[in-house]
Image (tube, grey):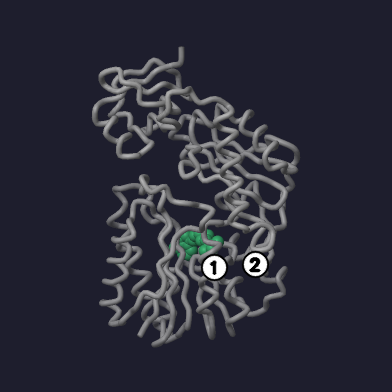
Amino acid sequence: MLPTVTITARGEDRIRSGHPWIYRSDVANVVAAGGETVRVLGPRERPLGYALYSDRSEIALRLISTGDEAPDLNTWRNRIQAAADYRTALGIYPDEATAYRLIHGEADRLPGLVVDRYGDYLVLQALSQAVDRLMPEIANILADVVNPRGILARNDPRVRVLEGLEQKVEVVYGDVPPSIEVHEGNVSYAVDPYRGQKTGLFLDQRENRIAAARYARGRALDAFSYNGGFALAIAPRCSQVLAVDISEDAVAKIAANAQRNGVTNIEARAMNVFDELRELERRGERFDLIVLDPPAFARNRAAVRKALSGYKEINLRALKLLPPGGYLVTCSCSYNVSEASFADVIASAAVDAHAEVVVVEKRMQGRDHPVLMTVPETYYLKCFILRKL
Ligand code: SAH
């Protein structure tokens, strides 16, 4: 007999609306331990399917099936295979890029599991108790399906603490070197899978970097540059690129990446973007293309208001630095800030900057990070390409 969790009528409604998460407040009764796969019952004992149970997270249940049959390791294998097949069908590897997201959690029906591919290696994150518990089996399946040389569990994100899980980084299969060489288009990177941000690169921006390059010319500014992703993608079409990041470490990475790609027109500065944008404005400098790719300003709902004023500030300053005909590539990766509120903020920044602005492209995270239609939280990265009239 499988462990069982009974949920409330409100929880049942949520499942019916297609959302796979049941919050703790909608759980009525638990006969299960954290990390177990459980049967989910409605208020009148009606079977609703199967879910992964967490005894710590506010997200108590992550639904994995609404069917009659209990999921087993074959379910995991089939879904991992399907996720890998989809990425193969996208045709990213190896010409377009050798690094991409292989498994994107809920959107691949593998809640709490993230896997990125860096060439011959995989870097995974187990973000729920159940996935953590199944780690050895999941690593075996991945080794089978993808045949990598090594798999690193990059289990140091903060969300693991909310699940009561230890933060640790360990090799779970084969060997993983301290530096992996990958490429995105013509740009090559040395990725540090053990210590780089996220799993090493911001893979979700790959297609937006390609898009940004289409508008690149003259002098460009890449604000919140990290290791220079946008700067490197646009540099071949620009006369000069200024890349700004607050972290000295990131700035060293930008310089090293420019050098390894033989790019000589990128200048990297360790500065706070908020200060630097004001300073550039004070000096009357102009940029034909500006990229704004800040970290998530709103990490929870309470932070949304402050986040919106941060987004407004940088967009307003950036619009002032553009000459007529200049382009702004502006992003938000806060899942708590909807596309509509982000668009509102940009519009009000444009009004305050006395800029008339048209939307040239509306973009999002790359196709290897698909959005689950019924889970708005999975549409986290918004990207507008704007042109100043
Ligand atoms: N554009 C990058 C990803 C950027 S991630 C890419 O395509 O890969 C966000 C970056 O913003 C981080 O590197 C972080 O160090 C930097 N950052 C955060 N706050 C900042 C600030 N106030 N000023 C400048 N950089 C900041």
The kind of residue on which mark 2 rests is Gly
Q: Which residue position holds label 1?
A: 209
The kind of residue on which mark 1 rests is Arg
Tell me the crowding category of disc 1: few under 14, some 14 to 19, or many 20 or more residues within 10 angstroms, Cα based: many
Q: Which residue position holds label 2?
A: 185
Query: Is 28 placed above or below 151 here?
Result: above
SS for dot 2: loop
Q: Position of residue 56 (x, y in %)?
A: 41, 28
Q: Position of residue 101 (x, y in %)?
A: 57, 50
Tell me the crowding category of disc 2: few under 14, some 14 to 19, or many 20 or more residues within 10 angstroms, Cα based: some
First along the sequence among labels 2 and 1:
2
In which quadrant of the rendered image does the C terminus lie? bottom left
Q: Is residue 302 left or right of residue 167?
A: left
Query: Is 75 placed above or below 282 here?
Result: above
Going by the picture, which residue comes out furthest to the front?
Answer: 68
- Does residue 175 appear in this view? yes
- Are discs 2 and 1 less than 8 Å apart at CB? yes
